[in-house]
Image: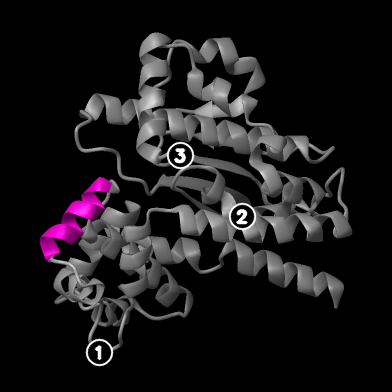
Amino acid sequence: MSFTQWSEIVIRLIELLPEKGLGYQFGFNCKLTSHGALGFALLTNNTIGKVLIDLQKYYNMRIHKMDLSILNKNDKIIMRLTPIYHLPSHLNESKKNIINKFFIESALIDIVTNLQLITNYNLSGLNVDVTWDQDDYHQFYEKRLPLIHFNKEYNQISFDIKCLDLPLTFSSPSAYLIAMELVNKEYLFYQDQDNKIILKVNQHLKFIPGIGFPSLTDVATKLKVSERTLKRELSNANTTFSSLLQFKKFELAKKLINSNRNIQEISDLLGYSHISAFSRAFIGWTGKKPSEYIREQRISFKDYYLKKSDSITH
């Protein structure tokens, strides 16, 4: 089923059953077994921290086009969800908001429910932030939910950093290795099944130092199609060349930040005429100024946890 078809089904369901909390219900019904090999890998892993490392890499394989960022801030682990899909252009803003809310709501509940399921210990300090107002249906689910804060800046889950070391109930190294073999095979299949034109464009969107990223004309030439044809095929895949390029720039900017480059260097490397232009683009990607983002990201979750694990084992 394509993402567009799934979106249409969601719209119809919500039109038939408005204000029933379908996002909550869907999230509660996403059991580990519904996530296939990845669910098996999460169940048999070693600790919550290692589960999060796998989730960060593979989660968007299970949930349509959803980026999962995991941050370490003020002794809290933050799991932040950001949609990277592009909804069909014929949908009005109201329907787009309905779909976005359903996807994010169900994803947040799915993650929280299953993280608590795989360990016998409570995730202390557990909170959920969402960017929308509280709906009337929330009261009917409140007892089953963690504390949810509405009208916040991000859609995210947070809990105490000490929870990273919580052991899993059904941890099994041998079973985990088997599961990860299946996950990696599924991941390759998933990438192959993603829209072919997006994969082809992304393959050619390679950054060249001193030159930058290729243009639409460059990529169209390499793919041996006209610019008009390329634009049309990307539109049929619910995206644009500009969107794919911006995502690539954001990914590269994050890597450069992790390599301790300063903002001016990053701006220059990405080909922005002035640091203010880069700052505007960065705010569009993250909702934050580059300096604010850098302060949050200086210690990434993965680096923190892996270093912590190494210090324990050596």
Secondary structure type for disc 3:
loop
The answer to which image quadrant residue 10 occupies is top left
Instruction: Locate residue 221, reporting x and y percent.
Output: 18, 75
The answer to which image quadrant residue 299 occupies is bottom right
Residue located beneath label 1 in the image: 210
Which residue type does callout 3 highlight?
A: Asn
Residue located beneath label 2 in the image: 186
Within 10 Å of disc 2 (Cα), the crowding (few <14, some 14-19, many 20+) is some
The answer to which image quadrant residue 304 occupies is bottom right
What residue sits 45% from the left and 39% below the top? 155
Q: How far apart are marks 2 and 3 (CA)?
A: 27 Å
Residue located beneath label 3 in the image: 155
Q: Do the residues labelled 3 and 1 touch (CB within 8 Å)?
A: no
Mark 2 vs mark 1: give the one in front: 2
Q: Is residue 299 left or right of residue 284?
A: right
Disc on the earlier residue, 3 or 1: 3
What's drawn in magenta, residue-wise? Answer: 227-236
Secondary structure type for disc 2:
helix
What residue sits 70% from the left and 40% below the top? 115
Tell me: residue 162, above or below residue 25: below
What residue sits 57% from the left and 20% below the top? 25
Disc on the earlier residue, 2 or 1: 2
Numbered mark located on residue 311 in the image = none
Q: Does the magenta stretch include residue 300?
A: no
